[in-house]
Amino acid sequence: MAYWLADKREGQDSDFLQRFDADYWTVDFPRPAMASIITQRSDTVRVDCEFHHRNELVGLIWDSEDRFDHPLLGYATDRDYSRTTLTFLWTSRDVRHLDEVNGPTLTIEGRDTDGNARSWFVRLWKYAEGAPNRATVTLPFSNLREGWLADGDLVNPAAIDRMFISIVPPGYDPADPSPFAQATTGVVGLSNIRVAGERAMLELGDVILPANGSGMATAYDDSYNLAPGRVLRNLRHLGYTGDVVHYLGMSHFFRLQRQPDGALLVDPAGTLSLPAISWHSQFLVKCKALGIRPILSLSYELLDVHCPSAWKQRAHNGTAARTGWEPPSTLLSPANPEAMAYLRSVAAKFLDLARTRSMAVAFQIGEPWWWVTADTRAPCLYDDAARAVLASRVPSVPAITDLRTASTPAELALLDAAGAILAESIADLAAAARAAYGGPLEVMLLAFTPTILDAATPEARRANLPTGWAWPAYDRLQVEDYDWLTAGAEALRRKAYKTVQARLGYPLDRQDYLAGFVLDPADRERFWALIDAGLDEARARGVVRTFVWALPQVCRDGYVRLPYQEKQVQPFDDLLYPLALGRDAGVSPEFSTSIALTASGHERRNSQWSDARLHYDVGPGIRGETDLGVLLEFFRARRGPARGFRLADPFDFSSNGLTGTPTATDQLIGIGDGLTASFWLRKNYGSSEDPQQRPITRPRADTVLVSVDGVPTTDWVLEPGGPVIFTDAPGAGQSVRAGFLFDVPVRFAEDRLDITGATFRAGEAPSVPLIELREEL
């Protein structure tokens, strides 16, 4: 499928919005504070806050440059606020009031009139009329002054990069990091937002792409700072319709509780934070209005610093499971009853939000697994709870310190038992989700094959792809393999699909495929091409439902997936031309070369075709009226030139010279890289380092022989069109060679066939021109 990486709008549709439109504010804050933003209308913003320490601050932000929307949908950058006035009604509850010390302050970041970076601190109370918790604020940017009494320097309105309003808890002290006894919450609202003056409007991208056949994935950890409507606008305008996978996250949705030792840990009851409740309530309502069904995704992952120690999976030496993210997350033990009760409670609370809003949703259990450490490959099966449960199920609990070497009967029994524990915990989570929703609920699993089917740890599947997941235990199976996809590990991906299918048995119409993601924007050009091709490949193998992971990277990199179209296949009858050609048949290879003659008589030649196109005249092979009848019937059956067919070229039909017997080492068709599985058959002409290469798309399948580094192999299959696909990718630097006999794909050159009986009586050969077909690889 065609795709596009857009850097900016270039003539696409646009509209206008009022500057400071509610949907385009954002929030941010240092952890462990929490906040989210929602909007009621284009002129009303609400910020929900949760504070844990006296020095925590939340910022309500307006950026002059759109940093979050897709390039085709964002608002235009305009840093000039000269002769522009912003007015809004401020309301607040349980935060510092406008008139207090350290009350709401507008921090403006930009440059002074000399071009030097500068920040101004504007006290909102000096521009307010009304009560300290409810007042109309008017900000004339060409006449704003900083300072307690608004008697300081004038703001330079012509060069503003960003501005944010500080929101702090009662008792705020920037120098005091001491904790509150329990979390304190507050709410701020900006309503009746109005902008007047010369620069009150901004151009806004308004491209609406047709449905592209794929769904989108989002995550609360990535979008908590954006209004839900802004997230969904990007999703819909880019052509992603139907279901959206929404990962609830591992770091922002939970309520924290202060422990006796001062640590902040998640509430074991699974209580959600006020900002998360507010954001998801509006997200669900807006999804319903747009006809989008969210797939609420919950994983076993939790931010390490907020996870109770006893809940963490651990290796045999006691090392806690930790991911490579910064800050790191950990994995909850499927054997720990308190940890699993917490997950079930979280699922119930989110699904209750949907139920009370009569919202159709699905539920995904995302990447549930026993962690394997990256450095030592130690499986994290040995937390206290897991040890106890495992000891009750197997005769012994051996210490597996490296999963790559696990092979003894006791070790394999342990891994099987761990898989059963994982499967049981997931079944319990699914049951709790269904019970909380109170109606039919589609439940699906998400499996990440590069980890659970890592070739270095072949027995990991016993623990992390348990047979307890097999169809029809769950409604759908979702598979993602982005590490392999973006690395080009084709053989590993193909092998994994077969393994998953053999082990779990989900019908293809009950499977989904997730493609992504691009962590580093420097990889955008290479990775998005692979991701887009991966989505098409999934459809080609029968997995119709696909999702792109994830929206923030799609917007950052400007990825545009165009509507899916079935590949147009030119009509071709896989039949051999029925008459023998004989040695009198004509063949004419043709190239296309542009030749420019300079004034000095020198030539400039440019080869426009990399391969010759063959022309044949097979008329001399017709030796009588019987052959003529066969030809006429064959011509009519092909509808003249409408349908292609095979031709046995009597002059060049073998990989070994022109007509020799094929061997497995005849033609070099590629060099292995340890990842690539597909190698296209080709024939090389010329002995130079740059031979002319001829793609072979119509080999005779029963003649194909293949070798790797000179050693014949049968570890491959031949697919239609000529690719040889290996089960295990040839190693890096290994030469892949093949031998074969082949036919030429051709068609009749003309709509009309002129042959008369007089031709034969005169002893003349009729003309039956054919032309070679160029088939897409």
Image (cartoon, helix red, strand yellow):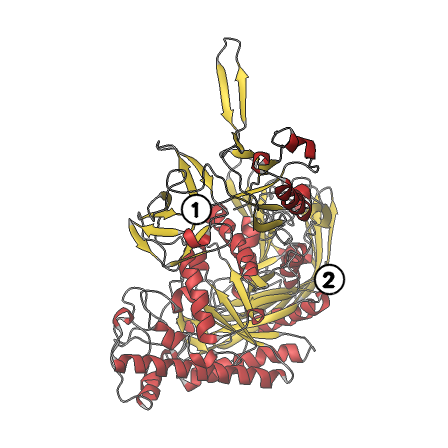
Q: Which dot, 2 or 1, sits closer to the camera? A: 1
Above or below — where is 113 with respect to 497?
above
Amino acid under disc 2: Arg
Residue at 61 percent across and 68 percent down: it is: 279
Q: In the visual, does 99 lie left or right of 397? A: right
Residue at 37 percent across and 43 percent down: it is: 667
In percent of width and height, residue 678 lies at: 43, 52
For residue 131, say whether it is visible: no
Residue at 25 percent across and 73 percent down: it is: 401
Pick the front one: 668 or 258: 668
In percent of width and height, residue 299 lies at: 48, 73
Above or below — where is 461 with respect to 777?
below
Instruction: Name the mark on residue 717.
Output: none
Classify 10 Å Cα crowding around label 2: few (below 14), some (14-19), many (20 and above).
few
Pointer 1: what residue?
741
Pointer 2: what residue?
41
Q: How many marks?
A: 2
Q: Residue furthest top?
A: 600
